[in-house]
């Protein structure tokens, strides 16, 4: 019998890790005034007053979140590693997951644990803690992160920093 000594790769940020059910994914239109190259897949989005989707910003709450950007293929890579890609503003619709299982990039110093709470960064950003980034602990400064209700980690992150979450946003 063969023994596997390494863990299987978790996936890519914004990838659906399990088969979605009917109604889990909806198509939305990107706000074309936003530079989407700085906001990747696997991050939560909200509606603008015009009904388009836009990234989260300081002062947003979990009630503002309408879903997570789903990684589409093919996508435009930011670098040639194949790991970083961003949504394309081409007038078409982009998929947004409202519930299900998704792989996301984990940021922050706290490790994710199975069943652990999921936090989203909305303020106090830096080069390593980006807006809409997923974290496993609340920030010590009030208002920098928000608890994403009805979401949990499905295990620890892989060596690449990708972790699976389950969530329901309706």
Image (spheres, rainbow, N blue to C red):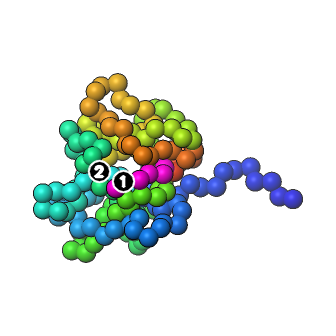
Query: How busy is the neighbourhood of tag 2: few (under 14 within 10 Å), some, or many (20 plus)?
Result: many
Q: Main secondary structure of the magenta part?
A: strand
Q: Position of residue 108 (x, y in %)?
A: 42, 35
**Which residues fall within the magenta stretch?**
165-170
Up-down relation of residue 67 to residue 152 (above or below)? below
Proximity of marks 2 and 1: CB atoms separated by less than 8 Å: yes
The part of the image, by quadrant, that contains residue 94 is bottom left
Question: In what element is the residue under mark 2?
Answer: loop
The part of the image, by quadrant, that contains residue 97 is bottom left
Residue 167 counted in the magenta span = yes
Q: Residue sitting at 48 percent across and 50 percent down?
A: 165
Which residue in the protein does label 2 denote?
Answer: 65
Q: Position of residue 64 (x, y in %)?
A: 25, 48
Tell me how far mark 2 sits from mark 1, CA to CA: 8 Å
Q: Residue sitting at 30 percent across and 44 percent down?
A: 62
Which residue in the protein does label 1 denote?
Answer: 169
């Amino acid at each position: 019998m063969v023994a596997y000594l390494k863990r299987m790769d978790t996936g890519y940020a914004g990838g659906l890790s399990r088969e979605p059910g009917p109604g889990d994914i909806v198509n939305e239109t990107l706000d074309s005034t936003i530079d989407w190259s700085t906001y990747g897949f696997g991050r939560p989005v909200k509606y603008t007053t015009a009904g388009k989707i836009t990234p989260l910003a300081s002062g947003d709450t979990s009630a503002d979140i309408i879903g997570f950007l789903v990684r589409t293929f093919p996508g435009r890579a930011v670098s040639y590693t194949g790991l970083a890609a961003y949504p394309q503003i081409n007038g078409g619709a982009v998929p947004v997951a409202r519930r299900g299982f998704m792989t996301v990039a984990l940021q922050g110093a706290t490790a994710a644990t199975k069943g652990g709470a999921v936090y989203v960064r909305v303020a106090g950003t830096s080069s390593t803690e980006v807006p809409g980034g997923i974290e496993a602990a609340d920030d010590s400064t009030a208002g920098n992160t928000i608890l994403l209700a009805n979401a949990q980690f499905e295990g620890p992150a892989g060596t690449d920093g990708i972790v699976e979450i389950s969530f329901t946003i309706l």
